[in-house]
Amino acid sequence: MPQTEVMKNQTHPVLTKRLAAERGQANHDWLQARFTFSFAEYFDPDQMGFKSLRVMNNDTIQPGGGFPNHPHDNMEIFTYIIEGQMQHTDSMGNGATIKAGDLQYMSAGSGIQHSEFNPSQENLTHLYQIWLQPNQRDGEPRYAEKPLGELVKNNQLTLLFSADGRDNSTAIRQDAEIYFGKLEQNQSVMMPASNSSPHVWIQVISGSISVLGESLSTGDGLAIENTADEFLIETTADTKLLLFRLS
């Protein structure tokens, strides 16, 4: 193969780290929030999302606090509970208490009303709320709960959501794959290459990892653009993370 053709086919990943301490923030009586991307009153033109990933909010809700009934449309919404519980109700008739270690999914579609509260009068609720922009508009709203304790295997990346719902994942309205990793210290896991989804976002929920020469700790995020090759995730502590493969 001519050298010029080799160079043409080579791609080099572009890495951009988003440190936990550099995130935007909001502090209210009932809510303390850290914003990876611009959200609500926090605006940074350099932090408007990554590909279809639009929101990565890390919220701490005080006992009894929460979000009263409010609308959403045309957004894929995921909530992962790190600590405590969250009480959910919506206009589809769903009502549930999501517990620590579990994940909730709503496809707002053509429109949905919902509320989210910390039902405890004593304990904090700590969570991530994540939004993906959909690739289909005005569909019928959807709702699903993912009890991760029954799904996630140690020292693996477990596929939770995908466009086609393969491998027991939940189908979503975006050409994306969302994985959860529960990894012990000094372990490694290989992420295969993907031509259809060559961009990756890694969000460290807890612990610390090394990826492509970058070190990440609790609350840090890493954007990897144009991952033409497989890459290794190595842990330096017990770690939980979310990984997004994006088109």
Image (cartoon, rainbow, N blue to C red):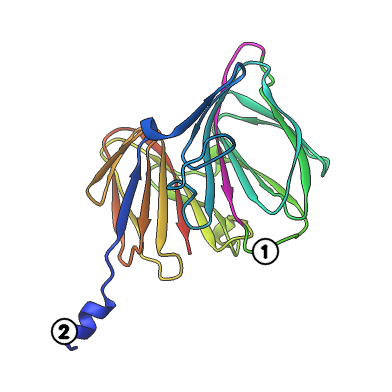
Q: Secondary structure at mark 2?
A: helix
Tell me which segment is drawn in magenta. Answer: 121-133
Q: Is residue 63 above or below residue 210?
A: above
Q: Position of residue 111 (x, y in %)?
A: 78, 50
Q: Is residue 149 above or below residue 222?
A: above
Between discs 1 and 2, the one toward the N terminus: 2
Tag 1: amino acid: Gln
> 163 or 23: nearer the eye?
23
Asked if residue 206 shows in the view, the reply is: no
Going by the image, does 51 lie left or right of 164?
left
> 232 or 156: nearer the eye?
232
- In reply to whether residue 141 is colored magenta, the answer given is no
| Residue pictured at 30% horizontal, 58% vertical | 14
Which quadrant holds the N terminus? bottom left
Whether residues under marks 1 and 2 lie with C-beta atoms below 8 angstroms apart, the answer is no
> 158 or 215: nearer the eye?
215
Q: Secondary structure at mark 1?
A: loop
Q: Spatial distance from mark 1 to mark 2, Cα to Cα?
A: 42 Å
Q: Which residue is mark 1?
A: 136
Residue at the extreme top of the image, as rendered: 122
**Residue 246, numbered label:** none
Q: Is residue 245 above or below residue 25?
A: below
Going by the image, does 202 lie left or right of 110?
left
Q: Position of residue 175 (x, y in %)?
A: 55, 63
Q: Position of residue 65 (x, y in %)?
A: 67, 20
> 35 or 9: nearer the eye?
35
**Residue 3, numbered label:** 2
Q: Estimate how packed mark 1 is, as few (under 14), some (14 to 19) or many (20 or more) residues with alpha carbons within 10 Å.
A: few
Tag 2: amino acid: Gln
Going by the image, does 155 lie left or right of 119?
left
Figure label count:
2
